[in-house]
Amino acid sequence: MAYNKPRDFTTKMIDAGQSKVFMSSKNTLIKSYMAGAILALAAVFAITISITTGSALLGASFFPIGFILLYLMGFDLLTGVFVLIPLALMDGRKGVSLNSLSKNWSLVFLGNLLGSLTIAIVISFIFTYGYQTDPGIVGNKIALIGEARTIGYSEYGIAGWITIFLRGMLCGWMVSIGIVGSVIATSAVGKITVMWMPIMLFFFMGFEHSIVNMFLFPFSMIMGGNFTISDYLLWNEIPTILGNLAGGLVFTALTLYSTYDKDEKEA
């Protein structure tokens, strides 16, 4: 498998980060909306496989399909721009500033959220035939997952909050490696292979991904999950986003830039 060396793929990631801030608001929203929707569908797919087959590993093995599809199509996840734009900012690229970074992150967050919510509503409608029947084993299971990953954490207080943050951090690290995989290989098969591995790992290990949760928890509430929006935000989404940011930024962006870009450029 042909691949780019670290110095080369880091430069490609910096170039990609710079290009994100010059994308129009309309295109940013559309691309992030589609990314949120595709990842939500992949989550439903993987959870359905896990529940119907009884194999969590099998479900995790198929979840990366969504991640791979959205990156091959050039769509944007918040966890992706958490890595790419900071790289361009650290490199001092023209037009990349804290303001442009904040604008892009806000638009991508909104687009991912709207795409995830759309799929949550559509799938909940399908599972219940227009909210007239029981959602079945998959819908009921997801409702329980939502409770366990909000109320379940809150029972442990600050230790629970830190646990979510750390799971989000490890997820952000694995997702950012998946993003590296999208530029490290030079062929479609190579990109798919490298992206597949870290994404399967994070899903199987139960790490917290902010965009997946934008679908999972609203869907769980629709299915009758016994928790509130404030429970979801405080005991999942907020620490997960912060963890995703920390994982991608510290373990991947700063590591790559300081080791393979900045030092070699100065040398």
Image: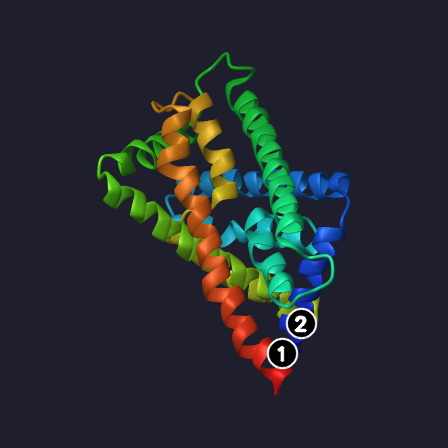
- Label number found at residue 95: none
Image position of 133 with respect to 182: above or below: above
Q: Look at 77% across and 44% down and name the residue there.
A: 24
x and y percent of residue 203 in the render? 44, 51
Judging depth in this view, the residue of 260 and 185 nearest the camera is 260
Which residue type does callout 1 highlight? Arg
**Colour scheme of the rendered structure:** rainbow
Residue 69 located left or right of residue 175: right
Q: Secondary structure at mark 1?
A: helix
Residue under label 2, please give it: 11
Q: Residue furthest bottom?
A: 267
- The answer to whether residue 256 is visible is yes
> How packed is label 2: few (under 14 Cα within 10 Å), some, or many (20 or more)?
some
x and y percent of residue 81 in the render? 60, 53
Quadrant including the C terminus: bottom right
Q: Look at 53% across and 60% down and name the residue there.
A: 176
x and y percent of residue 58 in the render? 44, 51
Q: Look at 66% across and 76% down and name the residue there.
A: 8
Which residue type does callout 2 highlight? Thr
Residue under label 1, please give it: 7
Image position of 90 with respect to 41: above or below: below
Quadrant including the N terminus: bottom right
x and y percent of residue 208 in the render? 41, 47
Inter-mark Cα distance, 2 to 1: 6 Å
